[in-house]
Image (cartoon, rainbow, N blue to C red):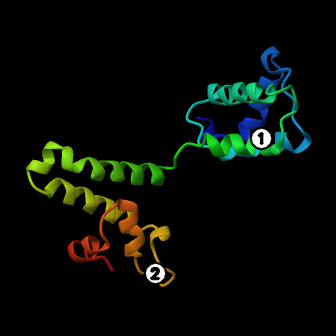
Amino acid sequence: PLRERPEDIPVILADLLETEHYLKLEFEETAMDELIRRLQQSSLSGNVRDVQRILDHLVLQSQMPQSHALTQKEISNYFAENREPTQDEFFVDTVQELLQQWPQTSFAKRGEKWRDALLDVALKELAERPEYKKKSGELNIHKLATILGVDHKTIKSRYPIS
C-alpha cells in the first residue's frame, strides 16, 4: 500500500497528471504541495486507484461552478470532509454503537455479562491513551464515561482504574 511508501506518491501523482484524463486539472502554486502532503499523510488503503479516486473528485471540483485552478484550501477541505476515521475513532464509535444497541439484543435477556465484557475491553483499551488522562496522569473518568455513553459512577464503582 502507498501508506507504507509515501515517498512514491509524488512520482505516481506526476505520472497520473500526465495522462489525458487529468491534463485539464490545474493547481494554484501551493495547492500541489498541499495535495502531496495530504496524500503522504493519509492512510491510503490501496495503491494508485486511491490516488485516482481522489484526483477524479478534484477534477469535478475544479470544474464547478466554472473551470478554475484548484486552491490549497479546496484540497484541505476535500481531505477534511473525506478523511477516514482513525483506528481509535473507529474503536470508540463501534463501542458506542454496541452499547446503544445492547438493550435490543438477545444478550440483554441473558443479563449484563456481555455489556460488562464490552465495557471491560473498552476501558482497558482507552484507559492507556493519553487523551483520556488528566494532566496529573489520572484517568479522566468523566470524559471516558461521556465517550462510552455510560454514567461516570458506573466506571468508578464497577471498574476501579487508577
Q: Where is the N terminus found, in terms of image quarters?
A: top right
Please, is residue 113 above or below residue 106 in the view? Answer: below
Please, is residue 154 above or below residue 1 in the view? Answer: below
Q: Where residue 66 sits: x, y (%)? A: 85, 26
Q: Where residue 148 sits: x, y (%)? A: 35, 60
Who's the residue at 22% across and 49% down the image?
Answer: 102
- Say which element carries label 2: loop
- Say which element carries label 1: helix
Left or right of residue 22, residue 2 in this image:
left
**What numbered label is drawn on residue 74?**
1
The amino acid on which the numbered mark 2 sits, given as a three-letter code, is Gly
- In this figure, which residue is indicated by the disc labeled 2? 137
Q: Quadrant of residue 34?
A: top right
**What numbered label is drawn on residue 153?**
none
Quick one: label 2 or label 1, which is nearer the N terminus? 1
How many residues crowd around disc 2 within 10 Å: few (fewer than 14), some, or many (20 or more)? few
Left or right of residue 126, residue 99 in this image:
left
Who's the residue at 57% across and 31% down the image?
Answer: 46
Report how far apart the C-alphas of labels 2 and 1 lie in the structure.
39 Å
For this rendering, which residue is in front, 55 or 41? 55
**In front of the other: label 2 or label 1?**
1
Residue 39 can be seen in this image: no
Residue at the extreme left: 110
Q: Where residue 93 sits: x, y (%)? A: 41, 50
The amino acid on which the numbered mark 1 sits, given as a three-letter code, is Glu
Residue at the extreme bottom: 136
Q: Quadrant of residue 62?
A: top right
For this rendering, which residue is in front, 105 or 9? 105
Who's the residue at 29% across and 59% down the image?
Answer: 121
